[in-house]
Image: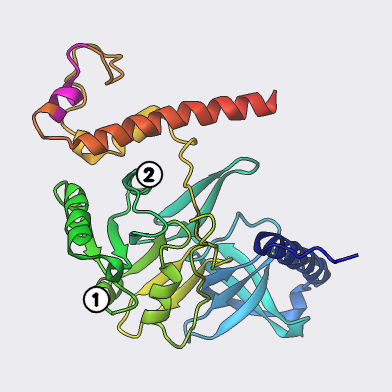
Amino acid sequence: MTKRKLTQNQKRRIQANRSKTLHRHQGRKQKEVEWQDEMLGETREGRVITRYGSHADIEDKNKEIFRCNLRRTLPSLVVGDYVVWRQGNEKLQGISGVVEGVYPRKSEILRPDYYDGLKPIAANIDRIIIVSAVLPTLSLNIIDRYLVMCENAHIPALIVLNKVDLFDAESRARAEKMLEIYHAIGYETLMVSAKTGENMSTLVEILAQGTSIFVGQSGVGKSSLINHIFPEEQALTNQVSEISGLGQHTTTSSRLYHLPQGGDLIDSPGIREFGLWHLTEDQITQGYREFDGILGGCKFRDCKHLNDPGCALKEAVKEGKIHPTRFENYHRLIQSLSETRAQRHFSTD
């Protein structure tokens, strides 16, 4: 009997299941490590540069990295957290110490999870860099989702359009016109190419200022940008699936990188859709900065900004103060919020 040939998707699922099994096995081994107080040195300060299941990589003031276990009483640690930890007198099963405390965060990015509620992604961020590209698709709706997140987290955003080497003159002009929508309301935008190096020096100059994080769909080239900026790191890259048109995940754990010019960069796992169902309708509305100063001017207090008479937002669209695409995406987000909540309610009944 001829052995059935596995598809690429089936192979990836099998590999993912094997990795999960190995991760669980390693996690059980690591839980066996019990640090007694006399086995640990004095408390030290450090920063989380990579976070795994039951442990984290901690960097000290000398830029030396130590893999540590986490006290069970700690809140969820993420990349970017500043912590207090203690080094062991010797390594135990490859573990160098234990994290005992975490400092308050000045900022954080949260992502909703169907099972665990709100989960932090990264902490102490100065700038969120939204990476998009012509492939898998240049979606302004997805960019708007990220911008709503940025506004609610009170973290400045930079919109980066990668893979511009794929443009011809006409498509480039069209993309520039699309980015002008955001530039006109005060967002920084930048067109780059990790392949040709276009505007990469400008991106590095921006990254050298504080701590930034890359976010964006899978396949938009975040790992390729990392490889260009840190060629010695050689982050994994992967091509966009020719079959589905969706990007393949190339980063499995968030990680913090240091730039030689100064500044830090966090690369987060690629996601195909960033859920906002944890936000209220008011929070999504406030996530559109161009609405500020117009909200409150509607004829009715319960205005839904659809076909309501005397809607100040619709009037602002007519007057060119609000771009029609942004206004359309706003209602799409509100609609998806209601649909997602309805699905979650149905699934828990």
Please, what secondary structure does the residue beneath circle 1 have? loop
Query: What is the three-letter code of the residue carrying label 2?
Result: Arg
Magenta span contains residue 313: yes
Q: Amino acid at mark 1?
A: Glu
Q: Is residue 125 magenta?
A: no
- Asked if residue 286 can be seen in this view, the reply is yes
Q: Position of residue 28 (x, y in %)?
A: 82, 66
The spot of residue 8 in percent (x, y) is: 66, 64
Residue 131 visible from this viewpoint: no
Residue 77 sits in quarter: bottom right
Q: Nearer the viewer, residue 248 or 243?
A: 243
Instruction: Name the side, left or right, on which 227 lies relative to 83.
Output: left
Can you identify the residue that label 2 sits on?
145
Question: Which contiguous range is marked in magenta?
Answer: 309-317
Counting other residues with Cα less than 10 Å from the Cα at mark 2, is it few (<14), some (14-19), or many (20 or more)?
many
Please say which color scheme the image uses.
rainbow
Q: Name above or below for residue 219 compared with residue 300.
A: below
- What's the mark number on residue 44? none
Magenta part, dominant SS: helix
Left or right? Give the position of 21 relative to 172: right
Image quadrant holding the C terminus, namely: top right
Q: CA distance from mark 2 to mark 1?
A: 26 Å
- The x, y position of residue 36, in whole percent, is 79, 73
- On the image, the x and y values in percent for residue 100 come to 63, 66
Q: Quadrant of the N terminus?
A: bottom right
Instruction: State the residue at coordinates (41%, 83%).
Output: 230
Label 2: which secondary element: helix
Q: Which residue is mark 1?
A: 198
Compared with 53, 295 (above or below) is above
Residue shown at the point (48%, 87%) measured from the top left: 62
